[in-house]
Amino acid sequence: MTVNVFIQNSDTFQGKGVRIGLQWLNSSKQVVRTDWSDYHNSTLNQWFNISVVGFCNNETNNEITDLQLLLAFEGSYSFGPLDRTYYDDVIMDRLVSVNVTDPTQPPPTTVKKDCDGFPAQALQVYWILKNHGYTDDNIFLMLYYKNDIDGIIDINAFDAYPNDLIHGSEPAVIDVANDSVTAARFKQELNVSVSGSFASKVKSNDYFIVFMCDHGSNAVLGDGNATFHFEADNSWISEFEFYNLVKNVKCARMMINIDCCFSGNFLNANQNIGSSWYNIPNCIMISAASNVFSWYWVNNQNPDGFAGSFFFHVFWDLLDQNQTINVAYNNALFFPPALPPPPRTVQMIQNPLMYDNMGINTTLSFNSEPPL
């Protein structure tokens, strides 16, 4: 559900703010579960949107039969007879059906299906880096694609490459593939103290980029903190572990892209969650979503014609066109994926986030000086 909200306030707003919820009921009209959005209390005198996503997962003898939409306000205005909170454009979408029997694990892999999404997104970033002068010595590619039924990863149905594991006569150089793509190996390569690891080879004048795409969860640790998952063995890395590895990489600049559900937790979208990225002074960090689910096209058989992230596919496509990070980010925010009409923007669906500790997102691109 997505709702547009406007808080009209002439003075000071007190309290947590506005949130929305999906309340699932059984046949006796008892509440089975309520999924809430985060609180928002913007008083900038402009409309903003709030989104919440929940799974209709039935339990034996407690089947969900009804759904109530909740528009909640918690707080008070200190002054002003005209102070109001307005709600408009309440939109409901059914986005996907998945098996969530075990919410601590990622959704089950789509074995024997054309499931290009995650590897396609990683390959898109790989080939764009190659297009802009990065060599395979500069790139460490971990790619899991073993369950794709045809063994072909096609990023875009309309481009010249029907199989993006190879461009012309040039194959993608995959450093770690399939069953070896695990959290243990990922942590090893990000650990500067491990001799020969990728992170240990980063020099003080280098630009370090990390792009992560796969499943994410905020249920594993029990406190709402995010974990990033690896399909090969259902292993995961927590935001704490990731932070403690990356903060030790000594480089000139770094850009980190977290492309998974609940990826905003890596940016402290929920203000009481996680180690803060804000004290890494040379970092630009971008997440595919706030503390909500993020969405992918499983393959390119859709009106948009691409496989991969609703957000990062557009973001990296614009970087490839030498746009700045700021232009790429904002255009990707307002991109309307081919969902049932009227169109929803990516911002309305999953609310990506960016934090730039260097303040260079408006100038940094592949053809800036120094370049991305």
Image: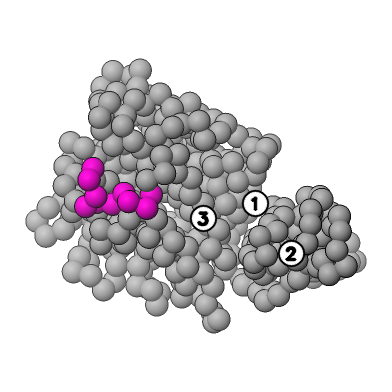
Q: Which residue is mark 3?
A: 352
Q: Amino acid at mark 1?
A: Thr
- Residue 179 magenta-drawn? no
Measured as percent of width and height from the top left, residue 54 is found at 67, 60
Q: Quadrant of residue 316?
A: bottom left
Q: CA distance from mark 2 to mark 3?
A: 22 Å
Does the image show residue 214? no
Q: What's the distance in space between the residues labelled 2 and 1, CA to CA?
A: 39 Å
Name which quarter of the figure residue 205 lies in: top left
Q: Secondary structure at mark 3?
A: loop
Q: Which residue is mark 2?
A: 7
Task: Tell me which residue sits at (63%, 47%) in the image.
Answer: 103
Which image quadrant: the N terminus? bottom right
Helix or strand or loop: what does disc 2 sit on?
A: strand
Q: Nearer the viewer, mark 3 or mark 1?
A: 3
Q: Position of residue 196 (x, y in %)?
A: 26, 22
| Rendered location of residue 265, percent (x, y) | 58, 43
Magenta part of the chain: 361-370
Please tell me whether residue 338 is drawn above or below residue 74 in the rendered image: below
Which residue is the site of mark 1?
Answer: 101
201 left or right of 22 in image: left
Label 1 Cα crowd, 10 Å radius (few <14 / some 14-19 / many 20+):
few
- At label 2, counting other C-alpha atoms closer than 10 Å, the crowd grade (few under 14, some 14-19, many 20 or more) is many
Looking at the image, do the residues carrying marks 3 and 1 touch, with CB atoms under 8 Å apart? no
Location of residue 303 with respect to 40 vertically, above or below: below
